[in-house]
Image (cartoon, helix red, strand yellow):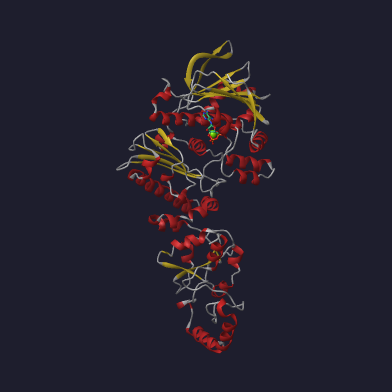
């Protein structure tokens, strides 16, 4: 046996541990939930790995999670016979945080406990939550197929120890040495109640010893009892699932701490047979804009976990969706390569996208406040949709929300439908302006004539808006038109008298225009008299077919 060695935690882990203990001490019950959730993930991973190599089961394919406690030693233990971890995996998974968004997370901390508790929840509490209940945690683990087991131990301060040990059974034991005053967890009834409350949806049996009353005291027997329901929640019928169960299941699949905003649970039959349970989170994760971030759908085949992070199941613009899809048709040995070229997967993806868009339409229509909160968190991601998903372009366009001169406020609340309902008689285009900030859009001189005539203009200032307008050129037959491009033809919105007046002005100023043109020379394409402005003396306009000024700035900033 290798001697014991002591290793230091990564600085971020130290910080996170302190924060967790101080901000989440009132959420003690979630410790069990997090550790059981990890045990369940470990079993899923083993089941999948064993599809390729059955020997990993080591003649024990009866996967389960065991919770036990020892009153004398004041410990609670969570054991699983899942995949386990090798020495390096323990160091990497437990001693470091390798998540994207870590920097942003630490930067956003405020020092205000309630606020930070929320942020930690969003970031993911996971394994470290053990230290909320325990002042020392021992983790003993052996990876399936290996003979080397390790024992990790830490008091959750600066460092941890590692040593080689013997562990006949595969998987992981986590021993919580309870803090002073946490003895209520050394109780059969208490533990079983927590498991039923938070982990009922876990697919694996969670077993504890059956207990008996003996002379007024509850004592454990040798018999096992399965505490949870242990059936796949998504396979049950909707009527049979409570709101709380849906919420707890969400926290398990998403590793999120907060309740979801909404969900859609469907059993699809016909050509493709599958079940989908898809959730919208309430809050955007820290790494929503990271390129290599994880995708949120878990793929199962006939209740067997196949893989996480399946980008084939949701398009990029819906990358915030979390949940499971369980197919009845795919082969169990399906690989990422096969998924990439699978017609079945394409059909499942198309069906699932429809469900998510339907869920959003339903929120927008029936729960406008929830939709507004969704839009604040994820609107900029949804705006990538029309460019990515041609077949659902119109549906997505109907879900978009913008700021406009109507409320003259930065809140994005105006839909194309709202806009159209306020169009002037004779107006046949949807007018917009793009700029690199809301203030710049709102104060653009291009808007003067529109404000004067009371014509609404959409004020677009998100980076993604230019990309959106590249793929969305009309809505329900109304053209989207920039107020800053080309000749401004307000068409029927101008009366004859106005046009006459304009012609006269143009003739009158011809000599001036010619002089300005000579002075500016090559730096401009053309100088002309404008009727766009009512207060400002002059403005820059992009040619009809040129890039807009804002896009030009964006490309320059990107080094193009
Ligand atoms: P998350 O579950 O969100 O990945 P956690 O902090 O809960 O984060 O766990 C960190 C990692 O430690 C897991 O991703 C997994 O690789 C490993 N791990 C934790 N518990 C177990 C376990 N019981 N068996 C195997 N691996 C585990
Ligand atoms: Mg976890």
Q: Which one is in front, 56 or 255?
A: 56
Percent position of residue 168, x then y: 50, 18
Q: Residue furthest left?
A: 271
Q: Residue furthest right?
A: 111
Percent position of residue 463, x then y: 54, 59
Residue displayed at 43% across by 46% down: 314
Q: Is residue 173 visible?
A: no
Q: Is residue 410 left or right of residue 157?
A: left
Percent position of residue 190, x then y: 57, 24
Q: Which one is in front, 404 or 4?
A: 4
Residue displayed at 50% across by 72% down: 485
Relative to 439, is 495 above or below?
below
Q: In which quarter of the image is residue 117?
A: top right
Q: Which residue lies furthest to the front in this view?
A: 2
Relative to 315, is 529 above or below?
below
Q: Residue furthest top?
A: 215
Relative to 490, is 388 above or below?
above
Residue displayed at 46% across by 72% down: 427
Residue displayed at 66% across by 30% down: 159
Q: Is residue 143 visible?
A: yes
Q: In the rendered image, which quarter contains the N terminus? A: top right
* Quadrant field for ligand 2: top right
Q: In which quarter of the image is residue 342?
A: top left
Q: Quadrant of residue 311?
A: top left
Percent position of residue 363, x then y: 47, 50
């Amino acid at each position: 046996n290798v001697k014991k060695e002591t290793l230091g935690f990564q600085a971020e882990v130290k910080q996170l541990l302190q924060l967790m203990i101080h901000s989440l001490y009132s959420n003690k019950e979630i410790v069990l939930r997090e550790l059981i959730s990890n045990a369940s993930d470990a079993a899923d991973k083993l089941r999948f790995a064993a599809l390729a190599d059955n020997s990993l089961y080591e003649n024990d394919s009866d996967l389960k999670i065991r919770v036990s406690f020892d009153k004398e030693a004041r410990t609670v233990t969570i054991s699983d016979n899942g995949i386990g971890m090798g020495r390096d995996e323990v160091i990497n998974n437990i001693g470091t945080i390798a998540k994207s968004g870590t920097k942003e997370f630490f930067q956003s901390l405020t020092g205000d406990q309630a606020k930070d508790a929320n942020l930690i929840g969003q970031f993911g509490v996971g394994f470290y939550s053990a230290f909320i209940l325990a002042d020392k945690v021992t983790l003993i683990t052996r990876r399936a197929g290996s003979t080397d087991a390790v024992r990790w131990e830490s008091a959750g301060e600066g460092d941890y120890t590692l040593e080689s040990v013997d562990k006949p059974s595969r998987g992981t034991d986590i021993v919580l040495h309870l803090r002073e005053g946490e003895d209520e967890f050394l109780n059969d009834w208490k533990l079983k109640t927590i498991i039923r409350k938070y982990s009922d949806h876990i697919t694996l049996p969670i077993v504890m010893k059956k207990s008996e009353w003996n002379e007024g005291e509850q004592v454990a027997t040798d018999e096992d009892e399965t505490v949870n329901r242990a059936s796949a929640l998504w396979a049950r019928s909707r009527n049979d699932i409570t709101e709380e169960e849906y919420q707890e299941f969400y926290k398990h699949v998403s590793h999120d701490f907060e309740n979801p905003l909404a969900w859609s649970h469907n059993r699809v039959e016909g050509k493709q047979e599958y079940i989908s349970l898809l959730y919208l989170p309430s809050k955007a994760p820290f790494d929503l804009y990271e390129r290599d971030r994880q995708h949120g759908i878990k793929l199962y085949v006939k209740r067997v976990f196949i893989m996480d992070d399946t980008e084939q199941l949701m398009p990029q613009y819906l990358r915030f969706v979390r949940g499971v899809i369980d197919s009845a048709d795919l082969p169990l040995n399906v690989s990422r390569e096969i998924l990439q070229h699978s017609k079945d997967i394409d059909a499942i993806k198309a069906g699932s996208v429809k469900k998510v868009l339907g869920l959003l339409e339903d929120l927008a229509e029936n729960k406008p406040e929830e939709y507004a909160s969704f839009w604040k968190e994820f609107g900029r991601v949804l705006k990538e949709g029309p460019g990515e998903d041609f077949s659902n372009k119109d549906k997505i366009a109907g879900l978009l929300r913008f700021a406009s001169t109507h409320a003259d406020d930065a809140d994005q609340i105006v839909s194309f439908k709202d806009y159209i309902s306020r169009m002037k008689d004779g107006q046949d285009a949807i007018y917009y302006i793009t700029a690199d900030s809301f203030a710049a859009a709102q104060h653009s001189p291009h808007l003067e004539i529109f404000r004067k005539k009371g014509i609404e203009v959409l004020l677009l200032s998100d980076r993604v808006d230019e990309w959106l307008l590249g793929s969305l050129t009309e809505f329900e037959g109304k053209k989207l038109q920039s107020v800053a491009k080309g000749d401004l033809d307000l068409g029927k919105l101008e009366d004859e008298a106005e046009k006459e007046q304009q012609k006269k002005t143009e003739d009158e100023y011809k000599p001036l225009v010619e002089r300005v043109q000579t002075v500016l020379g090559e730096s401009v394409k053309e100088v002309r008299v404008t009727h766009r402005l009512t207060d400002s003396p002059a403005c820059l306009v992009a040619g009809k077919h040129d890039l807009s000024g804002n896009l030009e700035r964006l490309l320059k900033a990107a080094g193009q």
